[in-house]
Amino acid sequence: MEWTGQQQLLFFWQSTGLGMLVGLVFDITSGLCRVIRRRWVVFLLDALFGVQAALITFFGALAIMDGQLHPLLFAGALVGFVMEHTSVGVYIGRGVCWCCRLFARASGVLLDAEMKMVGCFAQFSEKLRQQMRYKAKKGKKIRKKSNFFWKKS
């Protein structure tokens, strides 16, 4: 199937948008790799990026060029990838890295606060249990408080 120059230019620009989408996925995964430096996580993120890039390219080829893998598609995707990564991709990667670190700090602060609350409740319950043992040893009757809703008149 032969295309006119105008159709080829349209396909090229659509493929450029496809390449920008692949670049965005790459920048997000590279930002996550900067935060999580374990080898197996980096390997997993790289493998996931490869699968995502292949799926994006495949479905883009289906939508743009009726499933034909044309060199025009790959050239446009490469141009779009390079344009996205050099213009805003570095900032997106840094933003993802910053958000992950901020989330880690916030979750650490919340976890510390939760552990302090649990510690306070544990201390309170231990103190209450000791008071109950002390009163039981002295032989005092421990009066149970009646429930307000089930109180007999």
Image (tube, rainbow, N blue to C red):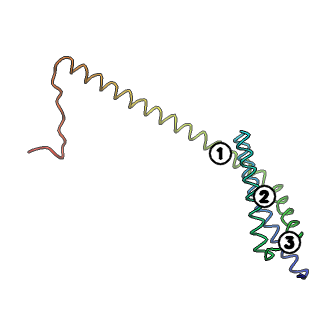
Q: Which residue is mark 2?
A: 23
| Figure quadrant of the C terminus | top left
Instruction: Give the distance between the C-alpha atoms of the residues marked 1 and 3, in whole angstroms.
Output: 35 Å
Establish if 14 lies above or below 151. below
Query: Which sits earlier in the primary sequence, circle 2 or circle 1?
Result: 2
Q: Quadrant of residue 77?
A: bottom right
Residue at 85% in and 69% down: 73
Q: How many marks?
A: 3
Residue 100 is marked as: 1
Q: Tell whether 109 sits left or right of 4.
A: left
- Residue shown at the point (51%, 34%) measured from the top left: 112
Q: Element at badge 2? A: helix
Q: Tag 3 or tag 1, which sits nearer the N-term?
A: 3
Query: Which residue matches tag 3?
Result: 12
Amino acid type for the residue under numbered disc 1: Cys
Q: Nearer the viewer, residue 51 or 131?
A: 51
